[in-house]
Amino acid sequence: MEQDSVIKRKKAFKMAYKIISYSFIVLLMLIASFFILYVVTTKVAEKKGENPPFGLYTIISPSMTPNIKVYDVVFIKKIDPKDLKVNDVITFYSTNAYFGGTPITHRIVEILDVPEVGTMYRVKGDANSLADEEKVYPSNVLGKVMFKIPQLGKVQFFLASKKGWLLAILIPSILIIGYDVCKLIRLISLRNKLARLGPNSLQ
């Protein structure tokens, strides 16, 4: 009975190891596929002189707290400026040299019809007491925020470091090697059992 219990635990461990290993590998493949698609669509859009159809931007300012926090990553979708409404959260390029071309994510609080200019957006950070002085041109809007991924930016900054990049390579490699070692051990164990049963068992 005890031997059966040990065998069952070993089988359960092997099954759990397989599930975790394959799940991790599939997750990495999905993430890699997404980023390849992201890079390709971005490059194509750049060649056409257009904004990419979607994007991921890490929030580095607390101006949108508590709804969007520092290190949250927002997923934005390119949208026709005519479809934007008050209360939509947008990511845009500022014309203010102070921000150095860094994309900003704020909420539309008013849609303006400026003479000789056309439609412009007054925006405001949720945590700010006043709306931005700068008004946003439709051509500077990168897209509308569709959803956020909480704190993913921390992972991004970690992976950008030497230690993080090394771990990102080592962990899947160790899992794959570990799985191969387990298979090898099982094969050796099986061969030893067959050898003990006699030479005829190996045929």
Image (spheres, rainbow, N blue to C red):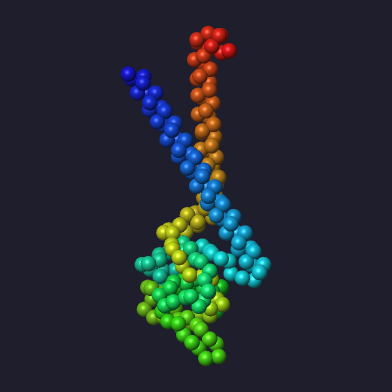
| Residue at 53% over, 86% down | 118
Judging depth in this view, the residue of 162 and 183 nearest the camera is 183
| Residue at 64% over, 67% down | 46
Q: Residue 152 appears at what percent x and percent y?
A: 45, 57
| Residue at 60% over, 61% down | 41
Q: Quadrant of the N terminus?
A: top left
Residue at the far bottom in the pictured view: 115
Q: Quadrant of residue 8?
A: top left
Residue at the far right in the pictured view: 47
Question: Looking at the image, is 160 positioned above or below residue 68?
Answer: above
Q: Residue 164 appears at what percent x and percent y?
A: 52, 50
The answer to whether residue 3 is left or right of residue 76 is left
Residue 56 appears in the rendering: yes
Q: Residue 5 appears at what percent x and percent y?
A: 35, 23
Question: Looking at the image, is 202 positioned above or below residue 134?
Answer: above
Marks counted in the figure total: 0
Residue 71 appears in the rendering: no
Q: Residue 104 appears at what percent x and percent y?
A: 49, 72
Q: Quadrant of the C terminus?
A: top right
Question: Looking at the image, is 103 positioned above or below residue 186?
Answer: below
| Residue at 66% over, 69% down | 48
Judging depth in this view, the residue of 85 and 154 nearest the camera is 85
Question: Looking at the image, is 120 positioned above or below residue 72?
Answer: below
Q: Quadrant of residue 128?
A: bottom left
